[in-house]
Amino acid sequence: MKNETTIFGIRAIIEAIKSGKTIDKVFMQKGLKGELFQELEHLLRSESINSSYVPIEKLNRLTRGNHQGAVAQISPIEFHNIDDLVMQVIESGKTPLFLLLDQLSDVRNFGAIVRTAECTGVTGIIIQKKGGAPINGDTIKTSAGAIFKIPICKVDHIKDAVFHMQSSGIKVIAATEKADDYIYDVSFKEPCAIIMGSEGKGINPSVLKVVDAQAKLPILGEIESLNVSVACGAFLYEAVRQRS
């Protein structure tokens, strides 16, 4: 899977982007210069493609090929348009249950969440273009193939998705330990979207300010938080319970 989702070489990456390939992330060597490299940088900015500058050792670990200072990961899935997906779900007559992931960074957590989302009837997952976990072989394996069965959208910022949900009549609920209410006190019966935060920072404070409701899980032990994929499963199955 790694070989199938990785391309290397500046020109090869440029041509892949121009041909419409869905690029998940591009790693570029720190300090690299030249006209071709500048062309790649310009293209990445214009297409809003996630990228980062890394030491050459990182690139050497990603591929044994002549990478010329650039390695790209191609997404194995095609992303959906959020406008079309929301409209499609509403028109289908199903009660929407969306999942918003605010810069979740661990691919195995991401894969586990996708697997649970598919099992609980989530109608779509929305992620941010930059800062989140890539969709690669580890994601696919951990999701048990569910990544191919559930629509996934990318947005510039999770707040864009929040506002879109709200304008479409979908309540947005943030999963956060900062909440006053437990998940059992919040209704998931109506059209709703659940936001899960990143492993280290949780949900961005600017996002928390614009949601419709916040909810938390009861924590009875000394450890103050759960793994995000476990917490997400608890939230999704509470939605299933309430809707049953």
Image: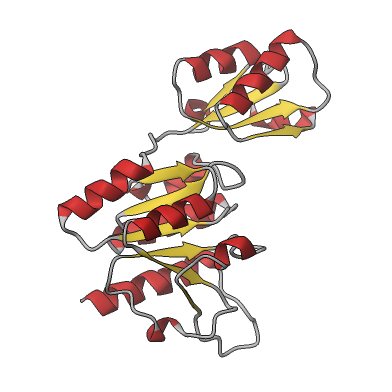
**Number of numbered discs overlaid on the protein picture:** 0
Q: Is residue 205 above or below residue 181?
A: above
Residue 156 at x, y = what percent? 53, 43
Q: Give the residue drawn at x 36%, y 39%.
A: 81
Quarter-wise, where is residue 232 in the image? Answer: bottom left
130 lies left or right of 101: right
Q: Tell which residue pokes out farthest to the left in this image.
A: 93
> How is the protein colored in the picture?
secondary structure
Quarter-wise, where is residue 129 in the image? Answer: top right
Quarter-wise, where is residue 206 in the image? Answer: bottom right
Q: Is residue 88 above or below residue 120?
A: above
Q: Give the residue drawn at x 55%, y 73%.
A: 176
Q: Give the residue drawn at x 60%, y 76%.
A: 225
Q: In the image shown, does 100 or 83 lie closer to the viewer?
A: 83
Image quadrant for the C terminus? bottom left
Residue 90 at x, y = what percent? 22, 54
Residue 220 at x, y = what percent? 56, 90
Q: Tell which residue pokes out farthest to the front in this image.
A: 167
Residue 63 visible, this orientation: yes
Residue 148 visible, this orientation: no
Q: Give the residue drawn at x 83%, y 24%.
A: 31
Q: Tell which residue pokes out farthest to the right in this image.
A: 31
Residue 67 at x, y = what percent? 67, 18
161 lies left or right of 65: left
